Image (cartoon, helix red, strand yellow):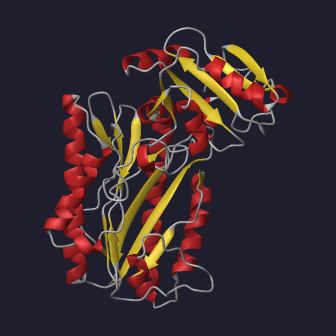
Amino acid sequence: MALDVAAIQRTVRAAGLDGWLLYDFHGSNPIAVRLAGLAGGPHMTTRRWYYLIPAAGRPRKLVHAIESHTLDALPGDTILYAGRQQLDDGVTRLLAGVRRVAMEYSPDCAIPYLSRVDAGTAEAIRGRGVEIFSSGDLVQEFEAAWTAEQLASHRAASEALYRIKDRAFAAAARALRDGTSLTEYVLQQQMVGWFEEEGLVSDSAPVVAVAGNAGNPHYLPTAEGSRRIVPDEVLLLDLWGKRNEPGAVFADITWVGATGEAVPPEAARAFGAIVEARDTAVALVEEAARTSRDLRGWEVDRAARGVLERAGYADHILHRTGHSLGEAVHGNGVHLDDYETHDDRRLLPGTGFTIEPGLYFETFGVRTEINMFRGEREALVTGPRQMEIMTLGN
């Protein structure tokens, strides 16, 4: 995707900034690498490069002489350096007239996904009298916002994930009914095969977790250490994937079943609480989209988590309410988080994210995960919501 310099400049001006400074060394800033169109490109990038998009005027590039073609695909004037004194002088020339600049920086590293500029580079910029601001909302608008084609790819991936989820629960129910042995790992590997059938790719096999293993949000079964799926336990499935095509974005869902004829009362009560928390978050996002008001990631997390805390589950919360979705399953947009971090970024139109409150105990865990897309005047839930734990027993 070509970098839209004119659109970036309009947004930079609206934010009261003098420019957006992209910087990378050896892939240390993957956000800048992608925005500059260098991901998987033909050039070696073993030296530091800078690309300043000013609020007005031509962009400026600072690149090493032996990698002088690194930013040739981008518009702007080029400054070359080789020795460290030339680099120092080049940074000064690059920043001439700039006093307020956005970079991939997060105060106090509140958002580690965004915090990509090292402390020494930040010192060098500030040492020239330049104030650094977070590029968080710029990144969302120009790197995390979905195109219409990406939204379509997300919907297709979501529909496929729900089909795989249904097949997995059916396989578990069949094994329980027939009295055949089925482990978490075997079911997981069956699901991996269904991913291939559906044309999905992922960065990991799905989570298949029963009983106490479901109390670990990132549990993954192995061939050597995997529980059998037996009656009267909680079975949690967490699966994420995207279409195997350029530019596709992820979908990510979690669903919970009970392997007996009835849902254990403690699990049912906990699940009722996370359903209320999820739907509270959904309603808040929908209202903000409908009224075009700014809504921050931390606000959604706080609203959902408040439901769980009031229900007496404060000690059983282990993670934030949701994360950004993109070409990576954890994207560079806003996260719904005031628990692990304080995400002050806005939920911008064109972005997608999960809503996934969960509660975790020694003997079971429950989580409900859905996906949302924020449009210009509406917010969409892109798949079915689970309202109660499903039973798999006879």
Relative horizontal placement of residue 222, taking residue 324 as reference (left or right): right
- Eyeballing the image, is 186 above or below 56? below
Residue at (47%, 18%) from the top-left corner?
18
Which residue appears farthest toward the bottom when viewing the image? 179
- Eyeballing the image, is 327 above or below 143? below
Q: Where is residue 146 in the image (x, y as percent from the top left)?
A: 47, 34
Q: Answer with the quarter of the image where residue 366 lies.
A: bottom left
How many numbered discs sit on the rendered protein? 0
Residue at (66%, 15%) from the top-left corner?
75
Residue at (60%, 51%) from the top-left corner?
199
Relative horizontal placement of residue 34, taking residue 267 as reference (left or right): right
- Eyeballing the image, is 339 above or below 332? below
Residue at (66%, 13%) from the top-left corner?
76
Relative to the observer, which residue lies in front, 52 or 208? Answer: 52
Q: Where is residue 172 in the image (x, y as percent from the top left)?
A: 45, 78
Q: Position of residue 131 (x, y in %)?
A: 46, 29
Relative to the observer, which residue lies in front, 35 or 190? Answer: 35
Residue 2 can be seen in this image: no
Q: Answer with the quarter of the image where residue 267 lies.
A: bottom left
Q: In which quarter of the image is the N terminus?
A: top right
Relative to the observer, which residue lies in front, 305 or 101? Answer: 101
- Eyeballing the image, is 124 above or below 354? above
Residue 129 can be seen in this image: yes
Q: Quadrant of the C terminus?
A: bottom left
Q: Position of residue 357 (x, y in %)?
A: 30, 61
Which residue appears farthest toward the top when viewing the image? 57
Q: Answer with the quarter of the image where residue 320 lies.
A: bottom left
